[in-house]
Image (cartoon, rainbow, N blue to C red):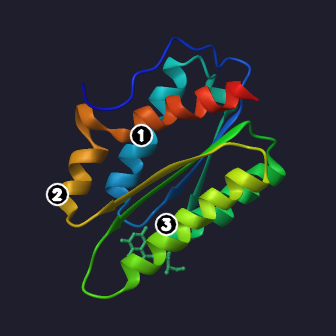
Amino acid sequence: MKGITFEKMDGSALKVGIVVARWNSVLTYSLRDGAIQGLKDSGVLDDNIVVLEVPGSYEVVFGAKHLIETKKVDAVICLGVLVKGETMHFEYISDAVTQGIMDLNTTTGIPVIYGVLNCLTEQQAEARATGDNNHGYWWGKSAVEMALLA
Ligand code: DLZ
């Protein structure tokens, strides 16, 4: 089976932040919707889901730190879609965001989920951000599982 399997979870006492990049927004908004569904299916209440938009994937780390510092969230999901272009932008942003999210995980005590797709083509990204294979759904559930560890 593709994807991640989860036990039944009770996230009803949790507050979860979602940081979503607007670059490639059709796909990132689809990931956001998938993540919200994953949270709700794990018991997280609508009122306890905080969504923050940022311009691009490079900004999701700052956005996640902001939510952790100002909203008392139990977990944060970082959502972005990076598609390789003709320049080195993709490599630099991808590396920076990946390292930045890991740093937040090791320094803040709050789980920060890596919901950034790094794809060679838009088709690859679409296949992972939409429909039955919307990775956002698993990332929502991953956030609940990790927050419940605390
Ligand atoms: C500039 C840029 C480029 C070229 N590509 C992407 C991308 O594929 N996905 C994405 O989320 N953001 C991209 N960005 C924008 C950067 O993430 C960032 O918003 C700007 O460089 C401003 O810091």
Mark 1 to mark 3 CA distance (whole Å): 15 Å
| Residue sitting at the far front | 106
Residue that carries the numbered disc 2 in the rendered image: 123
Residue that carries the numbered disc 3 in the rendered image: 57
Label 2 residue near ligand 1, CB within 8 Å: no
Identify whether 74 is placed above or below 65: above
Does residue 88 appear left or right of residue 75 in this picture?
Answer: left
Label 1 crowding class (10 Å Cα cut-off): few <14, some 14-19, many 20+?
many
Label 1 residue near ligand 1, CB within 8 Å: no
Where on the picture, by quarter, is residue 44? top right
**Label 1: which secondary element:** helix
Residue 41 in picture, x, y percent from top left: 49, 18
Q: Nearer the viewer, residue 77 or 111?
A: 111
Q: Residue at x 36, y 86 (%)?
A: 88
Q: Residue at x 20, y 65 (%)?
A: 121
**Label 2: which secondary element:** helix
Where on the picture, by quarter, is residue 15? top right
Label 3 residue near ligand 1, CB within 8 Å: yes
Does residue 128 appear left or right of residue 61 in this picture?
Answer: left
Cβ atoms under marks 2 and 3 closer than 8 Å? no
| Residue 55 can be seen in this image | no
Does residue 66 appear left or right of residue 118 in this picture?
Answer: right
Does residue 133 appear left or right of residue 56 in this picture?
Answer: left
**Circle 1: residue type:** Gly
Q: Earlier in the sequence, mark 2 or mark 3?
A: 3
Residue that carries the numbered disc 1 in the rendered image: 136
Q: Quadrant of ligand 1?
A: bottom left
